[in-house]
Amino acid sequence: MASINVKQEPGLQPEEVPSSAVATAAAAHPSSSLVNSHRQRINQTSLINFSDDEASKLCYPVGCPVGYNFTSSSSPNEVSFTRGCVVGAAMDRLSRNFVYRIQSDETMNLALEDDVAFAMGCPVRMSSKGQEVDGEIVCFSRVRGSSTIDTKYSVLICNGMNSRIVHGVSSHQVKFRLSPRPVTEVEKTVCKALPRVSIGSESETKQTSETSSQTRQLKWKPPSPKKRKALANRDLNQALEKVTKKTPELSLCLTVPQWVLRAGGNLVGTLIAQKKDIETKVNCPIQIQHRSDEVIISIASTSEDREARGHSVVRFKRIIQDFIIAHLNDDQSKGRLLFDLAKSASGSYRISHTPSGAVKQQSIVDQDGLVWMRLIDIPNDVSRKLQQLDCDVTKIQSRDSSTPIYIGASPLCNPYVLVYGYDLDKVDNATEDVSLLVESYARS
């Protein structure tokens, strides 16, 4: 399988790599030499992470819509794959292969460069006969050779109102291009292409008096200048309303927990100072609402590209979480922070919640992994017995190591027990056991 779920071991720190190393490695790994490596496993301990600027020199930079996780079907004319958006890149120091972090809905996966292709709708620049033209990917196919796999693309080339599709374009002939298309251009185009405005209507005809022998002809009377202007404005508004459709908005609002604000430090001031930098990273404006006892940070992406909207919101969520974690500088409170932020989330971007109180959120030990988590508050009278409670909690966790249980005792927030894992049923069962244990301690 080309892509695997990201499961980063706790305590591992990403290594930095100079920009020159990226350029050298990129030259040694042209995108056209697609070795069939979809059975290789990715060893994350040997990955060297690239910054966004360094990743921009690779074949699939951050923000590029891609297809990956290719699976052959029974028919030779069919292939299944997963669509996603690149959010990061790295290099395996052992194999020297490029590895991409790809966001698909709420799942983060890793994929080798050989097992990635430009997705449908991806803006590209195609080279042909010594010239470069801008186009858009329509579809692609994976062509297997004796020892390699090449990707062939069909590229849509637009020239005003005339378009053409070029089939069989090799992977080395296309490269990703940024497509800065402002929304306001839609209205400008519409205004230039409006139909002629009708300035007459039946209601403005005048009928002369009828005699018993004949009916006189209807005579048309030109409307007044004021009436003509009103009619023109009416038709203009109707045409704009029909042609300029509003892009669906993807929004997310995060409320900073009260205990974080009480922890001290100029969180809001630092956040405002870095606002422009965050907006550049997510490619979208953000809002910071600061009231006396509440801070709400929000984003509303209106990009025409659905994957770009999702990428902006997911990246915004991670940046804000990492920002507050770095501000607190307290590992013991990290679990409660991630849980409280997920519970406070609102907007059209959906963060999964369950009736039992579980939320799907970033793991406290794996930045790229999403897990189900539930939180149990520890009463003050039980907090004096945390060491003994920890021993009993360890016994519950020993029944199933796939559902970790973490006790957080931080001076910044109330003590808590965090239960998390990939299996929701196991998380709910372990939470019930821990809740009964905490209640028994409270009664004793």
Image (cartoon, rainbow, N blue to C red):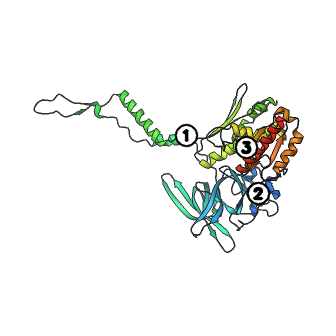
Vertical comparison of 250 with 141: above or below? above
Who's the residue at 64% across and 43% down the image? 350
Q: Callout 1: helix, strand or loop? A: helix
Looking at the image, which is closer to me, 105 or 304? 105
Q: Callout 3: helix, strand or loop? A: helix
Who's the residue at 82% across and 49% down the image? 397
Q: Residue furthest left?
A: 213
- Quadrant placement of the C terminus: top right
Q: Which residue lies furthest to the bottom in this view?
A: 146
Which one is in front in this view, the residue at disc 1 or the one at disc 3? 3
Amino acid at the residue labelled 2:
Ala
Q: How far apart are marks 1 and 3 (CA)?
A: 30 Å
Q: Earlier in the sequence, mark 2 or mark 1?
A: 2
Q: Earlier in the sequence, mark 1 or mark 3?
A: 1
The numbered disc on residue 23 is 2
- Quadrant placement of the N terminus: bottom right
| Residue count near mark 1 (Cα–Cα under 10 Å), binned few <14, some 14–19, many ≥20 | few
| Residue count near mark 2 (Cα–Cα under 10 Å), binned few <14, some 14–19, many ≥20 | some
Image spot of residue 347 (x, y percent): 63, 38
Look at mark 3 in the image and give the residue it sits on. Answer: 318
Image spot of residue 403 (x, y percent): 78, 50
Q: Earlier in the sequence, mark 2 or mark 3?
A: 2
Looking at the image, which is closer to me, 356 or 51? 356
| Residue count near mark 3 (Cα–Cα under 10 Å), binned few <14, some 14–19, many ≥20 | few
Look at mark 1 in the image and give the residue it sits on. Answer: 184
